[in-house]
DNA sequence: AAGTGGTCTAGACCACAAA
DNA sequence: TTGTGGTCTAGACCACTTG
């Protein structure tokens, strides 16, 4: 183990030791300096490798506490949330967008679990239909903080989805995925039978942790039958 | 901008320039050496910052080609795939596991799109039911490469899910999420009405890119009604 | 051929948490 | 208090790609 040691090879070596129980789950492994000496590389290289494994959930690292093999290795998948239009175009279709509804509502008139309590007084609600080659693709139901998107922001042709991604990046929020049965209204918009199982993606976006902006938007995307979220591991 | 510049502050400065269109979308930004000089820090620090933004999807970097602001910023969500038992326990329930079926099948008898063509001659099929406090939680339908999990690996009490995560980590694969309507058999196992919308998670796992092992496993997890995948952004 | 990102090194200082 | 990870620096070489 002399000469050039890539951080990947250090990572693979560590991985091997975890798999072969040389470093059993829960135990503490040698510190960076020791590993660097043993493997004949700089500590920074070991750091990069172990940080990568920690990011992957296989190691737990703490200052002063050292590095331990995670008792419960966790699989993590990164999945990219595409702009809907691009998602459609990437599938080789022509993207269409129809604004169905756009109005301001006061909080007292709203009863939707997706809307936070500590948000602004009024909210802008936008509903739109995304289509692929004139076939319904996805129904978008969005709540917007009017302070972020003033009423003169026209969403007649530009998807709010698209506008957002270009405007407020690096925001915090939650994402959840579920399944619902198509109701009558949804079935009509998506051109499917009532009762069909549909994939639903809900996302809430807040201003960055350090920032001053609070609630930005909450959106529910109801996809047409057969839609799948896909990602590589 | 003298003295100690953390890579986070460099990242934030770059982020600011992207948001304020100082670096418009699609344009090429100064190279690392120039930024390091301008901000008064080491190139490695700039590298760490820009790499972070590239990982987040806001920048695109290529050797020799330089760094560009992504035309289409992509939102990425990291979502952790828990071991089902832990998922259940984290919700405050007691996890149960029942093996429904475990047999070897030859490829010629199999007609399931989830199974790859270039896999092994025979496959082990395991079906099991996960429960939370005696309530059905998730139906597991798994195909296993028998070379990886020899028949003497007993899955009567240990979930294959759990065994896998502890055994073959850092593998490659794909993950997809969709929705289905409960058929009669599924409805019976999950104790719900036929036709109920259910969330389905399918995962295929192959050996690491560099490794010799091919197909490892493919699994279809059908969750009980109401289950949602959740993650922070 | 040459420019740009990717990474390694050796050394240093700091921040955090455990003893 | 003190050990361990987190990070910064200055310099160097390499790898990929584009002109």
Image: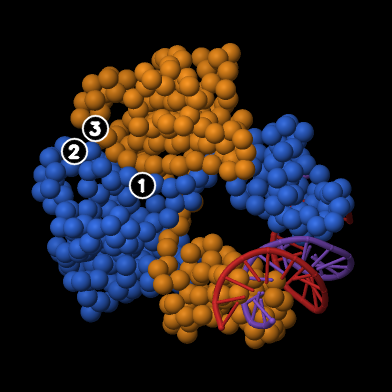
Chain colours: A orange, B blue, C red, D purple
Marks 3,1: beta carbons within 8 A: no
Residue at 23% over, 62% down: B95
Residue B78's place in the image compared with A159, above or below, is below
Mark 3 neighbour density, 10 Å: few (under 14) some (14–19) many (20 or more): many
Residue at 14% over, 43% down: B192
- Residue B56 x/y as whole percent: 60, 47
Mark 1 neighbour density, 10 Å: few (under 14) some (14–19) many (20 or more): some
Q: Mark 1, chain letter?
A: B
- Name the residue that disc number 1 marks: B229
* Horizontal arrangement in the rendering, residue A165 relative to residue B191 (left or right): right
Residue at 29% over, 50% down: B113
Marks 2,3: beta carbons within 8 A: yes
What is the quadrant of the N terminus of chain A in the image?
A: bottom right
- Name the residue that disc number 2 marks: B196
Q: Nearer the viewer, residue C11 or A196?
A: C11
Mark 2 neighbour density, 10 Å: few (under 14) some (14–19) many (20 or more): many
- Residue A110 x/y as whole percent: 37, 22
- Name the residue that disc number 3 marks: A181
Q: Nearer the viewer, residue B126 or A108?
A: A108
């Amino acid at each position: 183990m002399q000469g050039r040691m890539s951080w990947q090879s250090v990572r693979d070596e560590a991985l091997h030791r975890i798999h072969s129980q040389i470093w059993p789950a829960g135990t503490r492994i040698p510190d960076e300096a020791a590993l660097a000496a043993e493997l004949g590389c700089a500590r920074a290289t070991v750091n990069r490798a172990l940080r990568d494994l920690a990011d992957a959930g296989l190691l737990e690292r703490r200052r002063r506490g050292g590095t331990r093999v995670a008792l419960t290795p966790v699989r993590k998948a990164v999945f990219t949330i595409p702009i809907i239009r691009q998602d459609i175009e990437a599938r080789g279709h022509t993207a269409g967008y129809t604004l169905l509804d756009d109005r301001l509502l006061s909080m007292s008139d709203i009863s939707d679990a997706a809307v936070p309590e500590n948000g602004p007084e009024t909210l802008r609600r936008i509903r739109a239909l995304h289509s692929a080659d004139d076939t319904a693709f996805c129904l978008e139901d969005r709540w917007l903080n009017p302070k972020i998107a003033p009423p003169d922001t026209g969403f007649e042709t530009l998807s709010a989805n698209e506008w957002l991604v270009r405007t407020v990046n690096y925001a915090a929020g939650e994402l959840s995925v579920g399944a619902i049965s198509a109701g009558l209204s949804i079935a009509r918009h998506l051109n499917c039978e009532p009762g069909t199982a549909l994939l639903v993606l809900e996302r809430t976006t807040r201003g960055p942790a350090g920032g001053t902006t609070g609630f930005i938007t909450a959106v529910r995307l109801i996809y047409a039958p057969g839609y799948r979220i896909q990602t590589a591991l």
